[in-house]
Image (cartoon, helix red, strand yellow):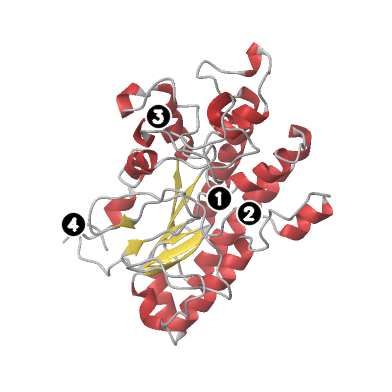
Amino acid sequence: MAGAVTKTTPLRLVVAVLLAFLAVTASASAPAKTPRRRAPCRGRPTARPSSAAPPAAGPTAASSSTSSAKSPATKGDFRYGANFAVASGTLLNQLLFRKKHLNVDQITPYSLGIQIGWFKKVLAAIASTDVQRREIMASSLFLVGEIGANDYNHPFFQNRTLGFVRPLVPRVIRSIALSVEALIKLGAKNIYVPGIFPLGCVPRYLYFYRGGEPGDYDSAGCLRWLNGLTADHNRMLKGKLRELGRAHPGVSITYVDYYNEVLSLITRPAVNGFAAGTVLRACCGGGGPYNANLTLHCSDPGVVPCPDPAKYVSWDGLHMTEAVYKIMARVLDGPFATPSIMSKCNHS
C-alpha cells in the first residue's frame, strides 16, 4: 500500500488503538453480536468499531481471518496485521480509576499503554534488527483510535458528575500524545488519530440522563453538555496533534473528524438512508426510552434486534450499526481526514 501515483515502498501496517496493526488489511474482532467491519486497503475502505476481545497472553494474530484470543501467534500471522483492541478499553490505567474510588470490575486492565507494549513485542517478532523494524515502521500506516470515550463512559455510568469527568480530559489527551510519540520513536511516519463520537447523541446516555430540561437538548435531540465535553476532548486533541506535528516535521500526523461524520448521520438521516425516528434509538436494546434500558443488553436472552438495522445509527445503544460503519469508510477517503488514508494506498 503506497501512494496511488508515486512508486514508493508499500505501506505495510495499520495500527488502530485501541491498537490494531496491519500489513495490507485492517481487521477487527468484537464481542458477540456487535457488528464489525474490516478495512482492506486493496479495495474500497470499510470501518471498524473500537471494541474487541483482549488477548489471553499478549498479542494474537488478526490477519486474513480473525483469530481466537488464545491462538498462539507466529510471524506469518502478522503478514496482514494484528488487532490489539480491547472491550471497554481505556487510555488511563485501571489503577487511576481505582484511586478515584470507581468500581473497576467492568474496566479492563489492558489500557492503551499495555497495548503499545503488545505492539512492541509483535514488532520485535516480525523484524530481528533495528534497521528492519524502522523500515517496517516508516512504510506503515497507523490508525490510533478511536479511543478515549470509555475513560468518560465508566465514570458517568457510575453516577459521577461532569465536574468529576472534565479534569480527566487533559490526562486522556496526554496519554494519546505519549502513545503517538512512542510510535514515532519506533520510526512511524504516517499516523491518523480520530476524535471521539458525539457522546450526547448516544442512546444509552440519552436514556441514562432522560427527563432533563428542554434546554439540555440541542435541535437534534442530543445532550448539549455531553456533546460539549466531547467537543472539548476533540479540540484539545487537535491542538496536541498540531504540537506533535511541529515537533516532528518529518512525520505526517492527521486528525480524523469522527465527531462531525457521525453527527451528520444524525442531523441528516434521510440523506444517509436512515429513518428520522430511529437515529437516537438503539436497534438492539432493552426497551424503554431510546430502546436503551440499562438493565438489559443486546446479548441478553430474549432481547430481539430491530427488523431493519440498516435504518438505525446505533446498534446496542453504544456501538454503531453495520450500516454506519460502512458509511464511516468515507472517513478513510475524505473529507474528514486530510490527506485521506486511501491516498496512502497502492491500488495496483
- Name the secondary structure under disc 2: loop
Q: Amino acid at mark 2?
A: Thr
- Name the secondary structure under disc 1: loop
122, above or below 107, in the image: below
Residue topped by disc 2: 90
Quadrant for the C terminus, please: bottom left
Observer-side mark, 3 or 4, equals 3
Q: Amino acid at mark 3?
A: Leu
Q: Residues within 10 Å of mark 3 (few under 14, many from 20)?
A: many
Along the viewing direction, whichever of 301 and 265 lies nearer the viewer: 301
Determine contact: label 4, label 2, CB under 8 Å.
no
Q: Earlier in the sequence, mark 4 or mark 2?
A: 4
The Cα–Cα distance between marks 3 and 2, rounded to whole angstroms, is 26 Å
Residue topped by disc 3: 265
Residue topped by disc 1: 147
Report x, y in % for residue 288: 59, 26
The Cα–Cα distance between marks 3 and 1, rounded to whole angstroms, is 20 Å
Residue topped by disc 4: 5
Q: Is residue 322 visible?
A: yes
Determine contact: label 2, label 1, CB under 8 Å.
yes
- Name the secondary structure under disc 4: loop
Along the viewing direction, whichever of 77 and 237 lies nearer the viewer: 77
Report x, y in % for residue 189: 42, 63
The Cα–Cα distance between marks 4 and 2, rounded to whole angstroms, is 38 Å
